[in-house]
Amino acid sequence: MPEHEAMLPDSAQVAVFDEPNGPFRLTRYPLRPVADTEVLVRVRMSTICRSDIHSWQGKRPSPCPGLLGHEIVGTIAALGASMTHDMREAPLAVGDRITWSEYFVPGRSWMRDVLDMPQKAPGVDKYGHLSSDTAPHHHGGFGEFCYIRPDSWILKLPDELSDEEATPINCGVATMCAVIEAADIRIGQTVVIQGLGLLGLYGAALAKSRGAALVIGVEALESRRQLGMQFGVDQTFAPDAVQIPAHGADCVIEVCGDPNALVSAMQWLRPGGRLVVAGLVNPNANVTLDAHRILRQCLTIVGVHNYHPRHLPQALDFILTHRSVYPFRTLVDRSYPLANISEAMTDAAQRHVLRAAICP
Ligand SMILES: [Zn+2]
Protein backbone atom coordinates (compact mmCIF):
# COMPACT_ATOMS: atom_id res chain seq x y z
CA MET A 1 0.00 0.00 0.00
CA PRO A 2 1.44 3.44 -0.92
CA GLU A 3 2.49 5.61 1.98
CA HIS A 4 -0.30 8.17 1.54
CA GLU A 5 -2.95 5.47 1.87
CA ALA A 6 -1.47 4.37 5.17
CA MET A 7 -2.82 7.66 6.58
CA LEU A 8 -6.40 6.71 5.82
CA PRO A 9 -8.75 5.60 8.61
CA ASP A 10 -10.20 2.06 8.53
CA SER A 11 -13.73 3.42 8.34
CA ALA A 12 -15.61 6.66 7.80
CA GLN A 13 -19.03 8.18 8.39
CA VAL A 14 -21.92 8.73 6.03
CA ALA A 15 -25.29 10.37 6.78
CA VAL A 16 -28.28 8.24 5.75
CA PHE A 17 -32.06 8.41 6.01
CA ASP A 18 -34.23 5.31 6.58
CA GLU A 19 -37.57 6.49 5.17
CA PRO A 20 -38.92 9.43 3.17
CA ASN A 21 -38.82 12.67 5.18
CA GLY A 22 -37.17 10.81 8.06
CA PRO A 23 -34.24 12.15 10.06
CA PHE A 24 -30.67 11.48 9.00
CA ARG A 25 -28.35 9.40 11.13
CA LEU A 26 -24.59 9.08 10.99
CA THR A 27 -23.29 5.59 10.42
CA ARG A 28 -19.89 4.13 9.76
CA TYR A 29 -18.69 1.83 6.96
CA PRO A 30 -15.22 0.43 6.32
CA LEU A 31 -12.87 2.03 3.79
CA ARG A 32 -11.12 -0.45 1.50
CA PRO A 33 -8.10 0.10 -0.80
CA VAL A 34 -9.00 1.62 -4.17
CA ALA A 35 -9.21 -0.54 -7.28
CA ASP A 36 -6.88 0.30 -10.18
CA THR A 37 -9.54 2.39 -11.90
CA GLU A 38 -10.95 4.11 -8.80
CA VAL A 39 -10.17 7.25 -6.83
CA LEU A 40 -10.97 7.79 -3.16
CA VAL A 41 -11.85 11.37 -2.29
CA ARG A 42 -12.04 13.12 1.05
CA VAL A 43 -15.21 15.22 0.70
CA ARG A 44 -14.71 18.96 1.26
CA MET A 45 -18.19 20.16 0.36
CA SER A 46 -21.43 18.70 -1.00
CA THR A 47 -24.36 20.96 -1.81
CA ILE A 48 -28.01 19.98 -1.51
CA CYS A 49 -29.52 19.86 -4.99
CA ARG A 50 -33.28 20.07 -5.51
CA SER A 51 -33.19 16.43 -6.64
CA ASP A 52 -31.66 15.39 -3.29
CA ILE A 53 -34.71 16.97 -1.66
CA HIS A 54 -37.07 15.15 -4.05
CA SER A 55 -35.37 11.83 -3.24
CA TRP A 56 -35.55 12.46 0.50
CA GLN A 57 -39.23 13.44 0.26
CA GLY A 58 -40.04 10.26 -1.68
CA LYS A 59 -41.18 12.14 -4.80
CA ARG A 60 -39.13 9.66 -6.79
CA PRO A 61 -37.96 6.14 -5.97
CA SER A 62 -34.92 6.20 -3.71
CA PRO A 63 -33.48 3.12 -1.97
CA CYS A 64 -33.07 3.19 1.84
CA PRO A 65 -31.00 3.56 3.89
CA GLY A 66 -30.36 6.34 1.42
CA LEU A 67 -27.04 8.09 0.91
CA LEU A 68 -27.58 11.32 -1.04
CA GLY A 69 -25.31 14.09 -2.33
CA HIS A 70 -24.01 14.30 -5.91
CA GLU A 71 -22.74 17.88 -6.15
CA ILE A 72 -19.38 17.24 -4.56
CA VAL A 73 -15.85 18.57 -4.43
CA GLY A 74 -13.10 16.82 -2.55
CA THR A 75 -9.41 16.14 -2.41
CA ILE A 76 -7.85 12.93 -3.64
CA ALA A 77 -7.04 10.63 -0.71
CA ALA A 78 -6.01 7.58 -2.75
CA LEU A 79 -5.47 7.02 -6.48
CA GLY A 80 -5.88 3.75 -8.36
CA ALA A 81 -2.78 2.73 -10.31
CA SER A 82 -4.26 3.56 -13.71
CA MET A 83 -5.84 6.87 -12.64
CA THR A 84 -2.94 9.06 -13.70
CA HIS A 85 -4.77 11.93 -15.46
CA ASP A 86 -8.08 13.77 -15.41
CA MET A 87 -10.43 13.92 -18.44
CA ARG A 88 -8.41 16.83 -19.82
CA GLU A 89 -5.17 14.88 -19.42
CA ALA A 90 -3.90 16.97 -16.53
CA PRO A 91 -1.86 14.78 -14.15
CA LEU A 92 -3.62 13.70 -10.95
CA ALA A 93 -1.96 13.41 -7.52
CA VAL A 94 -3.02 12.73 -3.96
CA GLY A 95 -4.14 16.04 -2.43
CA ASP A 96 -5.54 17.49 -5.69
CA ARG A 97 -8.95 19.11 -5.41
CA ILE A 98 -11.34 17.70 -8.02
CA THR A 99 -14.90 17.52 -9.28
CA TRP A 100 -16.34 14.65 -11.33
CA SER A 101 -19.36 13.60 -13.39
CA GLU A 102 -22.49 12.99 -11.32
CA TYR A 103 -22.83 9.54 -12.93
CA PHE A 104 -20.73 6.50 -13.78
CA VAL A 105 -21.41 3.93 -16.48
CA PRO A 106 -20.80 0.17 -16.44
CA GLY A 107 -18.40 -0.14 -19.37
CA ARG A 108 -19.14 0.05 -23.08
CA SER A 109 -22.55 0.03 -24.72
CA TRP A 110 -24.35 1.05 -27.91
CA MET A 111 -25.90 4.00 -26.07
CA ARG A 112 -22.57 5.20 -24.76
CA ASP A 113 -20.27 4.57 -27.72
CA VAL A 114 -22.45 4.82 -30.81
CA LEU A 115 -25.36 7.04 -29.79
CA ASP A 116 -22.97 9.15 -27.64
CA MET A 117 -25.29 9.39 -24.64
CA PRO A 118 -23.30 7.87 -21.76
CA GLN A 119 -25.67 9.56 -19.32
CA LYS A 120 -28.41 7.23 -20.62
CA ALA A 121 -26.31 4.06 -20.97
CA PRO A 122 -27.95 0.91 -19.58
CA GLY A 123 -26.95 0.35 -15.96
CA VAL A 124 -25.76 3.93 -15.44
CA ASP A 125 -25.63 4.86 -11.76
CA LYS A 126 -25.32 8.19 -10.02
CA TYR A 127 -23.47 9.35 -6.97
CA GLY A 128 -25.81 10.01 -4.08
CA HIS A 129 -28.58 7.81 -5.49
CA LEU A 130 -27.83 4.39 -3.94
CA SER A 131 -28.52 2.63 -0.68
CA SER A 132 -25.61 2.90 1.75
CA ASP A 133 -25.86 -0.91 2.05
CA THR A 134 -24.54 -1.14 -1.52
CA ALA A 135 -20.75 -1.60 -1.64
CA PRO A 136 -18.44 0.30 -1.47
CA HIS A 137 -20.90 2.21 0.81
CA HIS A 138 -19.15 5.57 0.32
CA HIS A 139 -20.71 6.71 -2.97
CA GLY A 140 -22.47 9.95 -2.06
CA GLY A 141 -21.48 13.46 -1.05
CA PHE A 142 -23.09 13.35 2.41
CA GLY A 143 -20.21 11.50 3.99
CA GLU A 144 -16.57 11.96 4.85
CA PHE A 145 -15.23 10.02 1.85
CA CYS A 146 -16.48 9.05 -1.60
CA TYR A 147 -15.17 6.44 -4.03
CA ILE A 148 -15.10 7.68 -7.62
CA ARG A 149 -16.09 4.59 -9.56
CA PRO A 150 -14.56 3.41 -12.86
CA ASP A 151 -15.93 5.19 -15.92
CA SER A 152 -16.55 8.54 -14.29
CA TRP A 153 -15.13 11.77 -15.71
CA ILE A 154 -12.79 13.65 -13.37
CA LEU A 155 -11.65 17.30 -13.55
CA LYS A 156 -8.95 18.97 -11.51
CA LEU A 157 -10.05 22.32 -10.02
CA PRO A 158 -7.94 25.49 -10.24
CA ASP A 159 -6.91 26.93 -6.87
CA GLU A 160 -8.56 30.31 -7.42
CA LEU A 161 -12.04 28.75 -7.46
CA SER A 162 -13.68 28.58 -4.02
CA ASP A 163 -15.52 25.44 -2.91
CA GLU A 164 -18.75 27.46 -3.04
CA GLU A 165 -18.16 28.28 -6.71
CA ALA A 166 -16.92 24.80 -7.60
CA THR A 167 -19.38 22.46 -5.88
CA PRO A 168 -22.48 23.02 -8.09
CA ILE A 169 -20.40 22.66 -11.28
CA ASN A 170 -20.94 18.91 -11.75
CA CYS A 171 -24.74 19.08 -11.58
CA GLY A 172 -26.36 22.52 -11.77
CA VAL A 173 -23.86 24.25 -14.04
CA ALA A 174 -23.08 21.27 -16.30
CA THR A 175 -26.80 20.55 -16.74
CA MET A 176 -27.37 24.15 -17.79
CA CYS A 177 -24.47 23.92 -20.27
CA ALA A 178 -26.38 21.00 -21.84
CA VAL A 179 -29.59 23.06 -21.79
CA ILE A 180 -27.96 26.10 -23.40
CA GLU A 181 -26.48 23.88 -26.12
CA ALA A 182 -29.93 22.39 -26.77
CA ALA A 183 -31.44 25.90 -26.80
CA ASP A 184 -29.02 26.89 -29.58
CA ILE A 185 -29.08 30.54 -28.51
CA ARG A 186 -27.79 32.98 -31.15
CA ILE A 187 -26.47 36.53 -30.83
CA GLY A 188 -29.22 39.08 -30.28
CA GLN A 189 -31.97 36.63 -29.36
CA THR A 190 -34.74 36.88 -26.78
CA VAL A 191 -34.64 34.09 -24.18
CA VAL A 192 -37.27 33.43 -21.52
CA ILE A 193 -36.31 31.42 -18.44
CA GLN A 194 -39.15 29.91 -16.41
CA GLY A 195 -37.90 29.56 -12.82
CA LEU A 196 -35.03 31.47 -11.22
CA GLY A 197 -33.76 28.83 -8.84
CA LEU A 198 -30.13 27.85 -9.11
CA LEU A 199 -30.56 26.33 -12.59
CA GLY A 200 -32.38 29.40 -13.88
CA LEU A 201 -29.74 31.76 -12.51
CA TYR A 202 -26.90 29.82 -14.13
CA GLY A 203 -29.01 29.59 -17.29
CA ALA A 204 -29.50 33.36 -17.41
CA ALA A 205 -25.78 34.01 -17.02
CA LEU A 206 -24.99 31.42 -19.72
CA ALA A 207 -27.63 32.78 -22.12
CA LYS A 208 -26.30 36.31 -21.70
CA SER A 209 -22.72 35.18 -22.25
CA ARG A 210 -23.81 33.34 -25.35
CA GLY A 211 -25.10 36.60 -26.83
CA ALA A 212 -28.78 36.83 -25.92
CA ALA A 213 -29.90 40.46 -26.19
CA LEU A 214 -32.88 40.10 -23.85
CA VAL A 215 -33.14 37.57 -21.03
CA ILE A 216 -36.55 37.48 -19.35
CA GLY A 217 -36.91 35.69 -15.99
CA VAL A 218 -40.31 34.33 -14.92
CA GLU A 219 -40.41 33.56 -11.20
CA ALA A 220 -43.03 33.63 -8.43
CA LEU A 221 -40.65 34.61 -5.61
CA GLU A 222 -39.83 38.32 -5.45
CA SER A 223 -36.44 37.69 -3.78
CA ARG A 224 -35.38 35.41 -6.65
CA ARG A 225 -36.57 37.89 -9.26
CA GLN A 226 -34.22 40.43 -7.67
CA LEU A 227 -31.40 37.91 -7.52
CA GLY A 228 -31.91 37.24 -11.22
CA MET A 229 -30.86 40.79 -12.05
CA GLN A 230 -27.38 39.96 -10.68
CA PHE A 231 -27.09 36.97 -13.01
CA GLY A 232 -27.83 38.45 -16.41
CA VAL A 233 -31.64 38.67 -16.31
CA ASP A 234 -32.81 41.93 -17.97
CA GLN A 235 -36.52 41.80 -17.07
CA THR A 236 -38.42 39.74 -14.52
CA PHE A 237 -42.09 38.95 -14.17
CA ALA A 238 -44.31 36.93 -11.86
CA PRO A 239 -45.80 33.96 -13.78
CA ASP A 240 -49.26 35.60 -13.98
CA ALA A 241 -47.98 38.95 -15.32
CA VAL A 242 -45.52 38.08 -18.08
CA GLN A 243 -45.01 40.51 -20.96
CA ILE A 244 -43.23 39.18 -24.03
CA PRO A 245 -42.08 41.49 -26.88
CA ALA A 246 -44.34 41.50 -29.96
CA HIS A 247 -41.79 39.56 -32.02
CA GLY A 248 -42.02 36.67 -29.56
CA ALA A 249 -39.28 34.70 -27.82
CA ASP A 250 -36.65 32.84 -29.80
CA CYS A 251 -36.24 30.38 -26.98
CA VAL A 252 -37.96 29.41 -23.73
CA ILE A 253 -36.14 27.39 -21.07
CA GLU A 254 -38.33 25.60 -18.53
CA VAL A 255 -36.54 24.99 -15.23
CA CYS A 256 -39.47 25.66 -12.86
CA GLY A 257 -40.88 22.15 -12.58
CA ASP A 258 -44.48 23.13 -13.37
CA PRO A 259 -45.92 21.28 -16.38
CA ASN A 260 -48.35 24.15 -17.06
CA ALA A 261 -45.32 26.30 -17.89
CA LEU A 262 -45.22 24.47 -21.24
CA VAL A 263 -48.59 25.92 -22.22
CA SER A 264 -47.35 29.47 -21.56
CA ALA A 265 -44.05 28.80 -23.30
CA MET A 266 -45.80 27.73 -26.49
CA GLN A 267 -47.78 30.99 -26.49
CA TRP A 268 -44.62 33.09 -26.16
CA LEU A 269 -42.44 31.46 -28.81
CA ARG A 270 -42.06 33.03 -32.26
CA PRO A 271 -42.55 30.80 -35.30
CA GLY A 272 -39.54 28.49 -35.45
CA GLY A 273 -38.77 28.98 -31.73
CA ARG A 274 -37.35 26.39 -29.36
CA LEU A 275 -38.59 25.15 -26.02
CA VAL A 276 -36.14 23.31 -23.77
CA VAL A 277 -37.71 21.29 -20.96
CA ALA A 278 -35.29 20.66 -18.09
CA GLY A 279 -37.27 21.11 -14.87
CA LEU A 280 -39.95 18.42 -15.08
CA VAL A 281 -37.81 15.85 -13.28
CA ASN A 282 -40.62 13.96 -11.55
CA PRO A 283 -42.99 11.46 -13.25
CA ASN A 284 -46.65 12.27 -14.02
CA ALA A 285 -46.02 15.83 -15.19
CA ASN A 286 -49.28 15.70 -17.13
CA VAL A 287 -50.53 18.76 -18.98
CA THR A 288 -53.11 19.56 -21.63
CA LEU A 289 -51.86 21.62 -24.54
CA ASP A 290 -52.88 22.37 -28.12
CA ALA A 291 -50.30 20.34 -30.05
CA HIS A 292 -51.53 21.94 -33.27
CA ARG A 293 -49.50 24.94 -32.20
CA ILE A 294 -46.27 22.92 -32.45
CA LEU A 295 -47.04 22.28 -36.11
CA ARG A 296 -48.43 25.67 -37.03
CA GLN A 297 -45.63 27.62 -35.32
CA CYS A 298 -42.94 25.15 -36.48
CA LEU A 299 -41.76 24.77 -32.87
CA THR A 300 -38.94 22.57 -31.62
CA ILE A 301 -39.35 21.00 -28.18
CA VAL A 302 -36.27 19.41 -26.60
CA GLY A 303 -35.89 17.59 -23.28
CA VAL A 304 -32.60 17.69 -21.39
CA HIS A 305 -31.78 15.38 -18.48
CA ASN A 306 -28.27 15.32 -16.99
CA TYR A 307 -25.47 16.05 -19.44
CA HIS A 308 -22.75 14.69 -21.70
CA PRO A 309 -19.21 14.58 -20.23
CA ARG A 310 -18.21 17.45 -22.57
CA HIS A 311 -20.47 19.77 -20.55
CA LEU A 312 -18.39 19.27 -17.39
CA PRO A 313 -15.26 21.15 -18.60
CA GLN A 314 -17.59 23.71 -20.23
CA ALA A 315 -19.21 24.30 -16.85
CA LEU A 316 -15.87 24.67 -15.09
CA ASP A 317 -14.54 27.07 -17.74
CA PHE A 318 -17.70 29.15 -17.67
CA ILE A 319 -17.57 29.62 -13.89
CA LEU A 320 -13.84 30.33 -14.04
CA THR A 321 -14.11 32.97 -16.77
CA HIS A 322 -17.27 34.66 -15.45
CA ARG A 323 -16.71 34.62 -11.70
CA SER A 324 -15.86 38.33 -11.73
CA VAL A 325 -19.03 39.15 -13.70
CA TYR A 326 -21.59 37.12 -11.73
CA PRO A 327 -21.51 36.51 -7.94
CA PHE A 328 -21.62 32.70 -8.15
CA ARG A 329 -19.97 32.43 -4.75
CA THR A 330 -23.07 33.86 -3.05
CA LEU A 331 -25.38 31.12 -4.36
CA VAL A 332 -24.14 28.65 -1.75
CA ASP A 333 -25.43 30.72 1.11
CA ARG A 334 -25.09 28.50 4.18
CA SER A 335 -22.95 25.55 5.26
CA TYR A 336 -23.61 22.87 7.87
CA PRO A 337 -21.50 20.13 9.44
CA LEU A 338 -22.43 16.55 8.49
CA ALA A 339 -24.10 16.01 11.88
CA ASN A 340 -26.60 18.82 11.12
CA ILE A 341 -27.75 17.46 7.78
CA SER A 342 -31.38 17.03 8.92
CA GLU A 343 -31.54 20.76 9.64
CA ALA A 344 -29.85 21.55 6.31
CA MET A 345 -32.34 19.38 4.38
CA THR A 346 -35.31 21.01 6.09
CA ASP A 347 -33.94 24.51 5.46
CA ALA A 348 -33.31 23.67 1.79
CA ALA A 349 -36.72 22.00 1.34
CA GLN A 350 -38.48 25.05 2.82
CA ARG A 351 -36.35 27.36 0.65
CA HIS A 352 -34.88 29.18 3.64
CA VAL A 353 -31.57 28.82 1.85
CA LEU A 354 -30.78 28.84 -1.87
CA ARG A 355 -28.03 26.19 -1.84
CA ALA A 356 -27.17 24.55 1.47
CA ALA A 357 -23.69 23.05 1.73
CA ILE A 358 -22.61 20.11 3.86
CA CYS A 359 -18.97 20.31 4.96
CA PRO A 360 -18.02 17.01 6.62
ZN1 LIG B 1 -28.36 17.80 -8.88
Image (cartoon, helix red, strand yellow):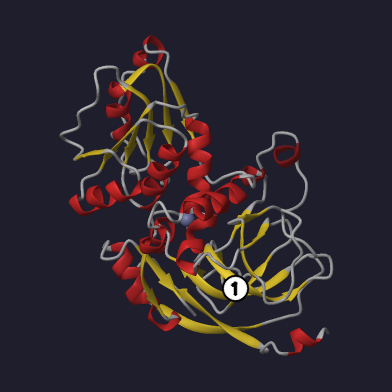
Q: Amino acid at mark 1?
A: Asp
Of all residues, the one furthest to the left in this rendering is: 241
- Report which quarter residue 260 is drawn in: top left
The residue lying toward the viewer, choosing from 215 and 127, is 215
Residue drawn at (51%, 32%) of the image: 182
Q: Is residue 26 left or right of residue 195?
A: right
Q: Mark 1 Cα within 10 Å, few/some/many (few <14, many 20+)?
A: some
Give how far across and how far down residue 123 sits, in percent: 67, 51
Residue 47: name its quadrant: bottom left
Specify whether 53 is left or right of 68: left
CB of residue at label 1: within 8 Å of ligand 1? no
Q: Residue furthest front?
A: 324
Viewport quadrant of the N terminus: bottom right
Left or right, residue 210 beside residue 226 = right
Quick check: 279 above or below 267? below
Q: Position of residue 158 (x, y in %)?
A: 60, 64
Instruction: Tell me residue 41's x, y (percent).
Output: 64, 73
**For numbered disc 1, what is the local secondary structure?**
loop
Please report the residue visible at 71 percent of the width from the left and 70 percent of the height from the top: 39
Count of number-bearing discs: 1
Residue 126's image quarter? bottom right
The residue to which callout 1 is attached is 133
Is 139 located above or below residue 231 in the figure? below
Q: Is residue 323 visible?
A: yes
> Is 25 rendered above or below residue 245?
below
Is there any visible trace of residue 279 in the rendered image? no
